[in-house]
Amino acid sequence: MSKDYNVIAGRSVERLAALSDDVFAVAMTLLVLDLKGPASALIHSEAELADALIGVAPHLLVYLMSFLLLGIFWVGQQTQLNHLARSDRGLSWIHLAFLFFVSLVPFTTGLMADYLHYRLALGIYWLNILALGAVLYWALCHSQTHQLVDGEFGDAHSLAIRRRILSAQALYALGAALCFIDTVVSLGFILLVQISYAMGLGLSRRART
Amino acid sequence: MSKDYNVIAGRSVERLAALSDDVFAVAMTLLVLDLKGPASALIHSEAELADALIGVAPHLLVYLMSFLLLGIFWVGQQTQLNHLARSDRGLSWIHLAFLFFVSLVPFTTGLMADYLHYRLALGIYWLNILALGAVLYWALCHSQTHQLVDGEFGDAHSLAIRRRILSAQALYALGAALCFIDTVVSLGFILLVQISYAMGLGLSRRART
Amino acid sequence: MSKDYNVIAGRSVERLAALSDDVFAVAMTLLVLDLKGPASALIHSEAELADALIGVAPHLLVYLMSFLLLGIFWVGQQTQLNHLARSDRGLSWIHLAFLFFVSLVPFTTGLMADYLHYRLALGIYWLNILALGAVLYWALCHSQTHQLVDGEFGDAHSLAIRRRILSAQALYALGAALCFIDTVVSLGFILLVQISYAMGLGLSRRART
Amino acid sequence: MSKDYNVIAGRSVERLAALSDDVFAVAMTLLVLDLKGPASALIHSEAELADALIGVAPHLLVYLMSFLLLGIFWVGQQTQLNHLARSDRGLSWIHLAFLFFVSLVPFTTGLMADYLHYRLALGIYWLNILALGAVLYWALCHSQTHQLVDGEFGDAHSLAIRRRILSAQALYALGAALCFIDTVVSLGFILLVQISYAMGLGLSRRART
């Protein structure tokens, strides 16, 4: 393996961002393939269709949760990428690892949707979230150690992102632990955490002033 | 949750646009997976193939409608995004919500294709359109309240977009209401509205001069 | 419908290009979903696997043809988009129509793969190609009539693109007509035309000097 | 075919990069469709679910390998594209050929996952890797012969990339040859090679100082 190759490889932040957006978009949209309407042969009235769609509702909820999850990590990743002056091969691979776990979300979500009452399914879903957070944390460390961040990005930014990742992961871990009470309680808690992060809207408004 | 994080998160209009384009593209193209040719074992002549394809035609029409719908909202969203000087975390999440409803279009469309004569299926399709319009309206309000728009974007622009969203949604609501007469009439009306918006071509030509 | 809206809508060439790349990419890649290996329960030896894969070969060929087709039209579209100074709402919709026919390629290709010996399937495939060419031609006319092209783009460029579209379409039409002899001859001819366009490599080399 | 057309066609490096990112993203994410949880009707306890998921594990491993493979070639391709000053029609088509083989990865991977113990499946997977390397090597030669590279790109860069492609392909070929001992050994070896390339992290760190 040539050292030279590693120096010239993987330097474009722009293409890393583009690939990431693409993977997120496909992962976000593929999930909808899991939403299947009922087979039309089985439906003979509006009431039967309504009943059948109520059966689809849990899947829609799970889809929403995953979309939220992907949204949270998309915002999290772009916040880091926006402050990169350049990339290197190592960082490209860390983000590729991140995208690997992003691409697993439709699978782990589908599993959880099919096995709502199984702790194993919830545990796998949580491991996916954990991996996303851990790799994003690693990306931050790598980009700081290797001085890839831009001039604007100071210690306050770094601290804010680290705190954010760690506190979110703590809450997800707590939510996952609730599965020892009940997997639906666990899922509900995780959903609340996700919604509150997406709702950061209000906070963000205050923070601007 | 750190205020700092919310201040630095979600600021890139460019990446928001890129993610949006990706989600639209996947949603537009996934719909085609619903177009399935007949199973070849059942077909023994050109006439039988023609018959089978005539059975596919309603699905093609529905696909066209959804493509039109996605096209209309893609143009609508990019019109707003083009006039953003910057984004914030709140706006990113509003657009993520928009993309969530974009990603549902293949599902709600597929449902309508399978249950053309059920008001419930049409109602869900309409709710999807309504949600798309409402979230886009919300995005406009948010970007103005938070001064995210660029210098070129004045009150006339804002008014034009608002009027456009409201008048279109009024027509879609009217179309949806027609389902109490007949769902096919309802669908036909919505299709005509969509085509007339896409055909804005002529108007646009005059408007330029 | 507000005139103002039509004036401010659909002006970004960049986002049109991004959406187009996305739709092409998904269409190019979705086709591979049609390539299915044999069910593993049916295979008990290398020889049986080889036999089964020989059965997949025609689909691979068809996939290659469609990839070629999408590649040809992607190059064709980007050649036009690269020379746009700006876009308008009309042009956005013409390109959306183009993308609609792009997104149909996996369907029409799949149909042809399943019904290789049916003229109807070949006819539909050819209509798809015809629509792609016609809409691209329309896009060129529109962008010239509305002065959307950049300063570099002169009459020689326009003529070159027009000649290229018309001659290619004439050859595709000839190829399609060959289906009255045999659909496989027809397909083979279209494939040769496509390969010779992709092979423009050699010509391009000479043209540069 | 007009020479003029070939001169003006396919010149945008940016759009080539965008299309490539899109195709990679879809190919990376489509692979996850092959990961299917067990049918819920068959599962009645956590233990049964665990058993069923252990059955999914080989597919996950294969998915990881393919993701690695796509990652390696994505980094490889962007390293070249980042150093292009411009493109031409020939180079566009070489990269389209590259993307064709990229889009085949989900198919050849799925085949290998289904027929882990068949040399034919492994051989096809290896041919896919070989084609990716060969086309990328061809792209490098073409871009140098036609002076499409930027000023920064010197002979040292070219040599580094060539050496990298050739040494990697030599190792993959060796790995593929191991299938005459055992296909699983062969796969394991290829996986180790891929991981060591992705792990180039450490080397890259040293190379920077």
Image: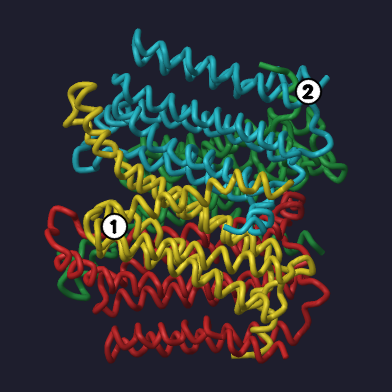
Chain colours: A green, B red, C yellow, D cyan
Q: Disc 1 marks which amino acid?
A: Leu
Image quadrant for the C terminus of chain A? bottom right
Image quadrant for the N terminus of chain A? top right
The percent coordinates of residue A33 (x first, y second) are 37, 54
Q: Residue at x 43, y 68 (%)?
A: C130
Q: Can you tell which quarter of the image residue A5 is in?
A: top right
Q: Which mark is residue A106?
A: none
Residue for badge 2: D156
Q: Nearer the viewer, residue C172 or B88?
A: C172
The percent coordinates of residue D20 (x first, y second) are 58, 45
Q: Are marks 1 and 2 on the same chain?
A: no
Q: Nearer the viewer, residue C33 or C49?
A: C49
Task: Label 2, secondary structure: give it.
Answer: helix
Q: Residue at x 16, y 31 (%)?
A: C42
For mark 2, name the chain: D
Marks 1 and 2 sit apart, C-alpha to C-alpha, by 49 Å
Q: Nearer the viewer, residue B80 or C198?
A: C198
Residue for badge 1: C111
Task: Label 1, secondary structure: give it.
Answer: helix
